[in-house]
Image (tube, helix red, strand yellow):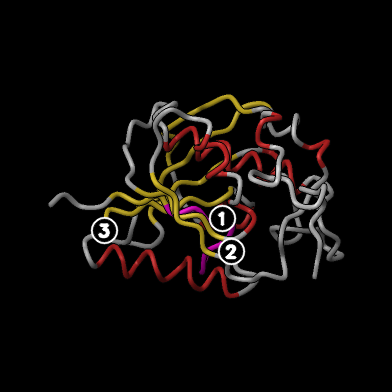
Amino acid sequence: MKNIKVLYASSEAYPLVKTGGLADVAGHLPLALDKEGVDITVALPGYPSVLEKTRSRIVAYLPTFQGYALIRETRLKRGGPRLWIVDHPLFSQRGGNPYGDDSGNPWPDNALRFGLFSHVLAQVATGKTDIKDQFDIVHCNDWQTGLIPAYLHLEAQSPATLYTIHNLAYQGLYPMDMREALALPEALWSSHGLEFHGFRSEERRV
């Protein structure tokens, strides 16, 4: 039986970037799966801390709905699984933590930032870039990767998806007027798609 190929998408992973428990899981689970023979690739946004802590090479250059993005390749740790870094100014030119500024205020364009991250990885997973890897599963983690299954749903053929919620308090709700900016068709705006009581909007803390 062939090895299962997994694209593991997360907004943080220890020790490169950490704000909570998501980073611990994303930093250790791929290592364990790699040791079990799973062909796993981890994908992270290119925050300044991630770029500063890694040495990488560019493996793809692709258009997005917000300019161009680079995909850089390295390893999550020496001898560990492959790591892809989505390098775009929305991530690389921001201080603070992954989700907010130095004062702790959420970035007002987080929907655009992580929508772009999701869109890029959906393009990669469906072979629309210079990277031609074929994945069996795309493992998405928390709201920051929640649009990956939506983008993949628009494709005639795509990998299976697995979605893990680590903290239900952060739901990533943004207004409907973000739909066009995120290159999402109106057909997805229903209670069977992305609509949530009229929202898909500004991150709301419950």
Q: Which residue is drawn at 45% across and 30% down?
A: 60
Residue behind mark 2 = 17
**Which residue, given by chain and number where applicable, does mark 1 sit on?**
50
Q: What stretch is highlighted in magenta?
A: 8-17
Place of residue 109 in the rendered image (x, y in percent of width and height, measured from the top left): 80, 45
Spot occupied by residue 18 in the image (x, y as percentages of width and height)? 60, 68
User: Is residue 81 covered in magenta?
Assistant: no
Position in image of residue 199 (x %, y %): 80, 49
As drawn, is 161 to the left or to the right of 165?
left
Q: Which of 163 and 192 is in front in this view?
A: 192
Q: In this view, does 35 lie to the left or right of 83?
A: left
Residue at the image point whose x is 56% and y is 69% from the top: 22
The part of the image, by quadrant, that contains residue 124 is top left
Q: Main secondary structure of the magenta part?
A: loop
Give the amino acid at mark 2: Val
- Dot 3 corresponds to which residue? 38
Calculate the distance from the C-alpha at mark 3 to the C-alpha at mark 2: 23 Å
Distance from Cα at disc 2 to Cα at disc 1: 7 Å
Question: Element under label 2?
Answer: loop
Report the front residue among 156 and 17.
156
Label 2 close to label 1 by CB (< 8 Å): yes
Left or right, residue 89 beside residue 33: right
Which amino acid type is shown beneath numbered disc 3? Val
Q: What element carries label 1?
A: helix
Q: Label 3: few (<14), some or many (≥20) within 10 Å?
A: some
For the residues carrying marks 3 and 2, which lies nearer the camera in this image?
3
